Amino acid sequence: MRLNGKVAIITGGASGMGRSTAILFAREGACVVVADVDRSAGEQAVAEITAAGGKAIFQSCDMQVESQVEELVKTAEAHFGKLDILFNNAGIEQPRTPSDELDTALFERVIDVNLKGTFLGCKYAIQSFLRNGGGVIVNNSSVSAYANVGCNLSYAASKGAIMSLTRVLAIEYARRKIRVNAICPGVIDTGMNRRNLDLAEDPAALEQAWMSATPMGRMGTGEEIAETVLYLASDQSSFTTGIGLLIDGGRVAT
Ligand SMILES: NC(=O)c1ccc[n+]([C@@H]2O[C@H](COP(=O)([O-])OP(=O)(O)OC[C@H]3O[C@@H](n4cnc5c(N)ncnc54)[C@H](O)[C@@H]3O)[C@@H](O)[C@H]2O)c1
């Protein structure tokens, strides 16, 4: 039970990597707040956790809206007494588009959800950690911060900025018992990539391109991501801060 007595917020916890992480964290003893814009899927994740004997609640939260993020942290504190861990995971994709044709409103939306949402999560979690004597943040960046995955400028820009934000916060709060790290997943089999495939002109060709860019020749799973988030969120990584941990089947090594 590596998270016994810990309280964790998982944004985007209704689906994909967030859902897998919420289930694993609860199994490891954490009290989990599943936060998402998708109430129905979020409540299903909570029902699965509680049916297995874990502790979890759902909180509706749009990470673009500051008052809702502030309320999310207050809810964790009110319900479970404190906050120890934030997995800042909520994010959206950008459909593949030549950058000179990218709709400016879509650019702003991707930056708002992925980057501003990550900033707001960090801002209110850190305020809570400072009241509580410390805490841990794991931000969800991407291999897109390092490798060109093609025609998704706003997504890559948001994920690159999440790495910069992670390093700034890690240094700023290193002596206040707050650790801030990021994960950089490669191609993971979640709703996001199923939607990317559905939107592709030739889904089979896109999937083949992903596989040939990944030395391990397969997609990662939400469960593999959850195990890495658990490592970074737990005391097992107590001397680690300011890093982006690649979980990419070897992609960036190529
Ligand atoms: N799937 C991949 O290959 C991949 C690779 C690298 C990074 N990521 C990142 O992983 C994270 C999780 O994505 P996933 O692949 O599990 O996809 P997913 O679509 O299955 O899950 C994303 C979740 O975020 C929620 N969400 C979206 N906008 C939100 C908002 N404004 N406020 C709160 N919740 C919101 C969605 O409802 C959904 O439950 C994202 O940040 C994504 O960019 C994904």
Image: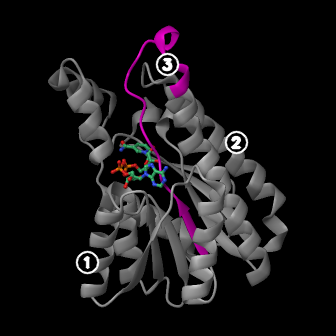
Horizontally, residue 219 falls left or right of residue 108, namely: left
Nearer the observer, 178 or 10: 10
Q: Does mark 1 have its CB less than 8 Å from ligand 1?
A: no
| Marking on residue 67 | none
Q: Quadrant of residue 145?
A: top right
**Residue 191: where, in percent of width, then height?**
28, 47
What quarter of the picture does the C terminus occupy?
top left
Q: Nearer the viewer, mark 3 or mark 2?
A: 3
- Can residue 96 be found in the magenta stretch? yes
Disc 2: which residue: 164
- In three-dimensional space, the C-alpha distance between marks 2 and 1, rounded to whole angstroms, equals 35 Å
**Residue 25: where, in percent of width, then height?**
42, 76
Q: Residue at x 49, y 33 (%)?
A: 144
- In three-dimensional space, the C-alpha distance between marks 1 and 3, rounded to whole angstroms, equals 39 Å
**Residue 219: where, in percent of width, then height?**
27, 43
Horizontally, residue 185 falls left or right of residue 105, namely: left
What quarter of the picture does the N terminus occupy?
bottom left
The furthest residue to the top:
100
Tell me which numbered mark, 1 or 3, is placed earlier along the sequence: 1
The furthest residue to the left:
204
Q: Nearer the viewer, mark 1 or mark 3?
A: 3
- In three-dimensional space, the C-alpha distance between marks 3 and 2, rounded to whole angstroms, equals 25 Å
Looking at the picture, does residue 113 appear above or below residue 153? below
Disc 1: which residue: 48
**Residue 133: where, in percent of width, then height?**
77, 82
Tell me which numbered mark, 3 or 2, is placed earlier along the sequence: 3
Looking at the picture, does residue 134 appear above or below residue 149? below
Disc 3: which residue: 103
Q: Type of residue at label 3?
A: Asp
Instruction: Read off the magenta span.
Output: 84-105
Please tell me how crowded label 3 is: few (under 14), some (14-19), or many (20+) other residues with Cα within 10 Å.
few
Q: Type of residue at label 1?
A: Glu
